Image (cartoon, rainbow, N blue to C red):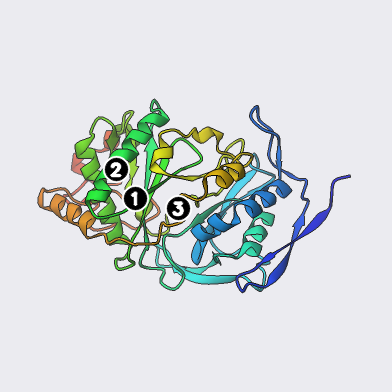
Amino acid sequence: MPADAQTLTAPGPDGQVRDVRLSSPDKVVWPATAHGAAITKADLAAYLEAVAEPMLRALGDRPVTLQRVRGGVEGEEFYSKNPPKGVPEWSRTTVCTYPSGRSHPQLVIDDGDLATLLWTAQMGTVTWHPWPVRSGDNDHPDELRIDLDPQPGRAFADVVEAATALREVMSEAGLTPFVKTTGNRGVHVFAAIEPRLEFLEVRHAVIGLARELERRRPDLVTTAWWKEERGERIFVDFNQATRDRTLAAAWSTRILPGAPVSVPVTWEQLAEVDPTALTLHTVPAFLAEHGDAWADLHASPGVVDGAYALWEADLERGLGELNFPPDHPKMPGEPPRVQPSKKVAEHWDEHGNRVENA
C-alpha cells in the first residue's frame, strides 16, 4: 500500500533540526516520459536534499515566489506570493512592495534552511522564483538578471552564441557575468551588483546592455517587446529586471515534462551541455561531478555604472523607454501598450496615451 506520510528532518533558518511532514510521498508530480520514470513528491524531496547546498545559496535571504501545482504538473498551476497557509513557525517572511503600490509579506528561504525548502515542496511547489534582492532591503537589487528567450526556429546553439556575445558586452561594462540553463530552451545570464540602485535604474542598465548587444548582433537578437516584431531572433528580456519579475532559481526544477532543471554552468560548459539532459534524475550526479559553477557569484559584486552609461548614451541618441509588463502601471515615456499591427496613429498622442473619441 502507498505510504500515507513520512517525516523528514532538516535544519531550519535558526540551524535547529526541524521535522517536516511529507504527506502522500508516493503521489506523482511529474508523469513518466520516454526519458525517465515518474517522479513522486518523495523523489522531489530527495532531489532537494541532494542539491540543498547550492540551491539554498541561490535562494538565501531572498523573498521567493512559489510556483505550485494541484494534482501534479498536469493539474492546476498557480503562484503563491503570500506565504501559504500553515507556514511553519520557524520560517520567516519579509514585506515586499509591488508595482501596484500594495505591500504584503513573502516567504524567505535562508541559506541553510532546508526545512522550509522541503515544506514548500510538501505544499506543491515545483519551481522556486527568488527576487533579486535581500530581505533587509527589498528595493535595491543585488543581482542583474537577463533572460535570453529564443523564438521558434532558433536552436540552443544560437542561444549560446547570443549569450557569449552578451558576456562580452557585460564584461566591457565592468560586470562579471554568470550563466545557467533555464530548464527550457533559453539561457539566464546573471551578474552580482552592489545594491545601490532601485529597480527602475537597474532595468534601464539592462536595456542599455540589451540595445548594445542588439546593435552588434541585429541578425541574432532583438529588444522588440511585441512578438510580431521579433521574427526568429532571440529576445533579450529586459523586463526580467522590473520589480516583481522573477526567474527560476538556480538548481530549481521546472514545471515542464520530465522535470528539467535550471543549472548553473561554466561558460566553457555552456557550449557543450545538452540542457534537455539536465533533469531531476541526472542533476545530482552532474553536481557531484562538476560542483556549483555559481559558488562565487557574489564574491565580488560589480557596479552598474558602465551599463547605465549605455542607457544614457541611447537617450542622447533619441532612444527612450521600452514597454513595461502589462500588470505594471503606465510609466512616463513608455510606448503605447498596443500591438504595432493594431496601432492607429491618430488614436495615440506623443506620450503614448490613448486619445479618446479620436
How far apart are the alpha carbons under marks 1 and 2? 9 Å
Residue 137 appears in the picture as rendered? yes
Q: Position of residue 241 (x, y in %)?
A: 35, 54
Judge left or right: residue 4 versus residue 312: right
The residue lying toward the viewer, choosing from 135 and 358, is: 135
> Any mark on residue 177, and which?
1
Judge left or right: residue 310 versus residue 281: left
The mark nearer the N terminus, 1 or 2, is: 2
Callout 1: few (<14), some (14-19), or many (20+) C-alpha neighbours within 10 Å? many
The residue lying toward the viewer, choosing from 354 and 137, is: 137
The amino acid type of the residue labelled 1 equals Pro
The mark nearer the N terminus, 3 or 1, is: 1
**Tags 3 and 1 touching, CB below 8 Å:** no
Q: Which residue is mark 3?
A: 294
Name of the residue lying farthest toward the front: 289
The mark nearer the N terminus, 2 or 3, is: 2
Q: Quadrant of residue 283?
A: top right
| Residue that appears at 43% across and 38% down | 269
Q: Which residue is mark 2?
A: 166
Judge left or right: residue 123 versus residue 183: right
Which quarter of the rendered picture does the N terminus lie within? top right
Judge left or right: residue 192 versus residue 84: left
Callout 2: few (<14), some (14-19), or many (20+) C-alpha neighbours within 10 Å? many
The amino acid type of the residue labelled 3 equals Trp
The residue lying toward the viewer, choosing from 60 and 232, is: 60
| Residue that appears at 32% across and 48% down | 238
Q: Quadrant of residue 91?
A: bottom right
Q: Position of residue 332 (x, y in %)?
A: 23, 58
The amino acid type of the residue labelled 2 equals Leu
How far apart are the alpha carbons under marks 2 and 3? 18 Å
Q: Secondary structure at mark 2?
A: helix
